[in-house]
Amino acid sequence: MSKWADLQRLHDVNRGRHILDLFDESRAVDFSVTADGMLFDYSKTSIDSATRAALVRLAEVSGVAEKRAAMFSGEKINDTEGRAVLHVALRAGEEAVIRVDGQDVLPEVRRIRAACAAFARDVRSGAFQGQGGRITDVVNIGIGGSDLGPAMATLALAPYHDGPRCHFVSNVDGAHIHDVLQGLDPTTTLVIVASKTFTTIETMTNADTAKRWMGAKVADPAAQFAAVSTARDKTSAYGIDPARVFGFEDWVGGRYSMWGPIGLALMIAIGPERFDEFLAGGRAMDQHFLTAPFAANMPVMLALVGIWHNQICGHATRAVLPYDQRLARLPAYLQQLEMESNGKRVAIDGSDLETHSGPVVWGEPGTNGQHAFYQLIHQGTRVVPCEFLVARRGHEPDLAHQHLLLVSNCLAQAEALLRGRSLEEARAIMARRGATGAELERQARHRVFPGNRPSTVLAYDQLTPFTLGQIIALYEHRVFVEGVILGINSYDQWGVELGKELALALQPVLEGKAGTEGKDGSTAALVAFLR
Ligand code: F6P
């Protein structure tokens, strides 16, 4: 019998049941998980005790515990690339030992972290200077995992910035680097070229542009460049002093890399001590993930709620809705983390997946989204499971009244999704407004909210470095658990290759150096239009 059968049966049996009817006096507590001051409430979903038990069994029979042990102990679970998966090593505690090929990797992790911290301190204190004086601005040039993590976190932790201003350039569109560099002083700017492979065309093209921009004003542009990469040979060939090259190993996936030197820009912005607090938050979530029983394990339950909604209920997307403006880039960060990891149609053994791959992830901060796409979430024909995030308090004590408004909006949206508004209630509203007869009926139908729409809330005290570390590690482990259950290798990304190859081949075609033979009619016509 398929491992999904129990859950499919439970879904069919309970179809049509209203989530509100599941509530008794203890459901909110029983269907919540806590971890180090953070609360994950999934009581506003259709999961009941029997469903949860079946979901937990699914995690057990899928080998989540065994695979978790394998990951944390440095086994090569990324088996299409023959690599360990050890982003957890980047935030491991002082006493930890993790071996890859018999070698403890942590001494080198600590050495590189110390080197990054020393450089960050030098930049912040002015001990490291640009050719025109103290560094005022840092430009991180990277893309995907070498951009989204540090860019998201630098915005998230803005209240802790006390270093130079940090900017992020990712897109190969020249408009991006043009707009970022405009207004910066090349003599006091530090450029960090962040690329795991140091071959990514967007990053290397932007790095060349930055070098030319700097070279127009300073004698030695390379002296104001640093690099973060696994490819030390390539960084040397690029002319960057090895003293300012911060390496990492191939067992850190790009989208999991912000805990190490890829986080250098963030470390410069907030300082190494705050960065350590971020690591400590991730480490606390690792401990929780390793030790809590599945039903009380936040990453496991977050993953199981995701599996329930996507693979069992058939909801193809999920919305991530932070009621925290500084988490504005979290949805984009999670798009890479989740969709590059679990957007795969083939299982680890090369067979077709038994179910759908991971969902489409999207979102925007509240309350902005309310005035944009929530219409569809409330009244559209498709159900979109919503994942709200909200802090108990903001960082602006003088604006506590605005934070209260923010929280009330967040809770109200989750409540509205749950309870909806019946036709009877809508009719009463229209009657109070003086409508009658057929017009009352017509108008009332537009004001019905079906309700019974699932949402979860991740609540925390305040968006501190520690909390952000918890949140990011939570989502990383969620991806891991979902990947194990789906039978996917979450740590490769072959699906990004074809487009890269075709783009390379199209460059000479667009330059007019090669023809469009062999191209489909649409591509050939677009080349003709755009050339
Ligand atoms: O194209 C996808 C990807 O390989 C991501 O996985 C990665 O985060 C990004 O490109 C950037 O790669 P790199 O850090 O090697 O420049």
Image: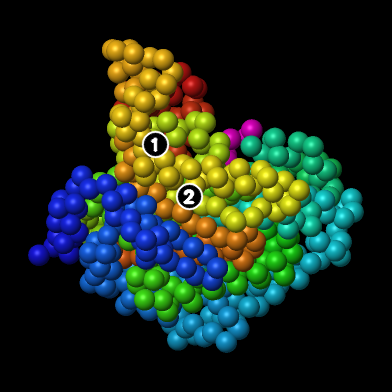
- In the rendering, which numbered label is found on residue 312? none
Q: Secondary structure at mark 1?
A: helix
User: Dividing the picture into quarters, in which one does residue 431 lie?
Assistant: top left
What secondary structure characterizes most of the magenta part?
loop
Q: Is residue 315 left or right of residue 86?
A: left
Residue type at mark 2: give it.
Phe
The verdict on label 1 being within 8 Å of ligand 1 is no
Q: Nearer the viewer, residue 187 or 55?
A: 55
Q: Secondary structure at mark 2?
A: strand
Q: Is residue 172 magenta?
A: yes
Q: Is residue 276 left or right of residue 301?
A: right
Where is residue 287? Give x, y as percent.
Answer: 49, 77
- From what the image shows, is residue 361 above or below residue 282? above
| Residue 67 visible in image | no
Instruction: Please name the residue that numbered disc 1 is placed on.
Output: 377
User: Dividing the picture into quarters, in which one does residue 74 lie?
Assistant: bottom left
- In the rendering, which numbered label is found on residue 388? 2
Where is residue 344? Give x, y as percent.
Answer: 31, 53
Residue type at mark 1: give it.
Ile
- From what the image shows, is residue 172 above or below residue 448? below
Residue ID at (40%, 70%): 297
Q: Is residue 105 left or right of residue 62?
A: right
Q: Are marks 2 and 1 in contact (CB under 8 Å)?
A: no
* Mark 2 / mark 1, whichever is N-terminal: 1
Q: Nearer the viewer, residue 222 or 364?
A: 364
Query: Bounds of the magenta span?
Result: 170-175
Q: Is residue 124 magenta?
A: no
| Residue 506 visible in image | yes
Residue ID at (34%, 70%): 295
Mark 1 Cα-neighbour bin, 10 Å: few <14, some 14–19, many ≥20? some
Residue ID at (66%, 71%): 276
